[in-house]
Image (tube, grey):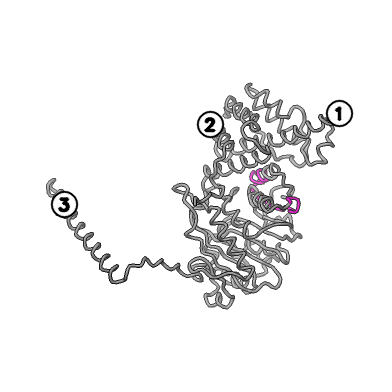
Amino acid sequence: MARKKADNTAEIGFEQQIWSAADKLRGNIDASEYKNVVLGLIFLKYISDKFDSRYQELVDEGEGFEEDRDEYTYKNIFWVPQEARWAAIASAAHTPEIGKVIDNAMRLIERENDKLKGILPKNFARQELDKRRLGEVVDLFTNVQMAEKGDTRDILGRTYEYCLSKFAEAEGKNAGEFYTPACVVRTLVEIIQPYHGRVYDPCCGSGGMFVQSAQFVHRHQGRISDLSIFGQESNPTTWKMAMMNLAIRGIDADLGTFNADTFFKDVHKDKRFDFVLANPPFNDSDWGGDQLTEDPRWEYGTPPAGNANFAWMQHMIHHLAEGGRMGMVLANGSLSSQTNNEGAIRQAIVEAGLVEGIVAMPDRLFYSTGIPVSLWIISKEPGRQHRTLFVDAREMGTMVSRRLREFTDEDIAKVAEAFDAFRKGELEDEKGFCAAVDVEDIAKQDYILTPGRYVGIRDEEDDGEPFEEKMERLTGELAKCFEESDRLQQQIRKNLEAIGYGF
């Protein structure tokens, strides 16, 4: 059976059209700046479409309320002034003023909607942006409903996510600030299973964890309204991207009123959450730990000033409600490091019975780094047996380019099903893949949590060839290789002697 990709590189019609057209528009603008142009335009089209749909409903009702802003705001639809509506933008698509028209629309929308103040990009009039090609992209958006049937919000939401992944690919090492590959997020979400309750990400980037959580609920016939979304992001540009991404998806979220450093300005300080999902910066050495040595969040030990891994972990455990479940991505050093108090912190967390599972992921899943990572699954479920499920998924995934690997839907399902069976007490250890381990056995390994130590090596399938016959065949093949090697060496010597370089 063909292995289905899990959304990192999926190219679905309209998304690819937009990216191809928008890529021509880029010109000499850096990808880090240019993404605000494309993503801002997607957002503008989305809120315009939502407004127009409600506008038409009111016109059809015939009561004359189509210009009454209350008829929009009570349905959580942004109010769009007449000069900012897509019809006005589309009519100016092929004029030299199109950039100014879009910038003005952004300003008008911000002025009329408090939630959007200071969030929307206003850089479309810049000289280096080709206005002819900008107009072509506007035309593409104008025809979105003709391009593909379906909910425009879903189409634009997919386009936003697709363009985020393409910008992450273009930016490489800097992409980690705003983008976690969708297949990694989906793996976490399928394990954590956020059906309902409060979901929190303290370093939310562009909001991918929230989008996938909402999609998980949708796939399981739940209601998005059953989720309450909370987050925080320190990078101002990324924080704005998250706000737009969530708005396009129709997800109401509390990301604070501005960007802020989670360690020094915890905007959700007194809140506890049912689910915590995060991909914090790997091995961050410049997080200000020397100024937070007495912080109450460090229940399991003071994290080293030179590495924020266990600061992020303890911050999230601190915010996890009783009965809650948490999943985070960390560099593999967090599994085994014994330096600067990290080993003692890890031991304390294990002994507290919090580590429900560890998943060793394969390398090359990220645009920003080729290193392999691990998923930590933390649980505060009352009465949970103090056992840990170790999953070794390092050999899973499919290479989709020379530099990038993806977890397929089948890979994600296999890992998630192991956790389901573990929670039901029905898991059978599978050598080389998974094993359920008691705290006592982890202690014998000095609290090192590398899955390979616990799951062992997968048995090779017996090919039915008797050992003696196999050894005779292999040594015969090796002898032939040696003979060929000798022949080639002699030929090389002769060739060198022929040109006066014998040795």
Q: Specify whether residue 189 is painted magenta.
A: no
Is residue 338 at all visible to an observer of this figure?
no
Residue carrying label 3: 491
Q: Amino acid at mark 1?
A: Gly
Q: Specify whether residue 228 is painted magenta.
A: yes
The image quadrant that residue 184 belongs to is: bottom right
Cα–Cα span, label 3 and label 1: 93 Å
The image quadrant that residue 199 belongs to is: bottom right
* Residue that appears at 56% across and 44% down: 165
The percent position of residue 414, horizontal first and vertical second, equals: 55, 60
* Residue that appears at 67% across and 23% down: 92
Nearer the observer, 305 or 17:
17
Q: Is residue 486 left or right of residue 157?
A: left
Is residue 356 at all visible to an observer of this figure?
yes
The image quadrant that residue 195 belongs to is: bottom right
The percent position of residue 287, horizontal first and vertical second, equals: 61, 57
Q: Nearer the viewer, mark 3 or mark 1?
A: 1
Q: Amino acid at mark 2?
A: Lys
Which numbered dot is residue 24?
2
The kind of secondary structure element at disc 2 is helix
- Seen in the picture, residue 292 relative to 151 is either above or below; the reply is below
The percent position of residue 212, horizontal first and vertical second, equals: 64, 51
Q: Amino acid at mark 3?
A: Gln
Residue carrying label 1: 64
Q: Is residue 373 left or right of residue 289?
A: left
Magenta stretch: give its range. Answer: 223-242
Quarter of the C terminus within the rendering: bottom left
| Of the image marks 1 and 2, the number of the one nearer the N terminus | 2
The kind of secondary structure element at disc 1 is loop
Label 3 near label 2: C-beta < 8 Å?
Answer: no
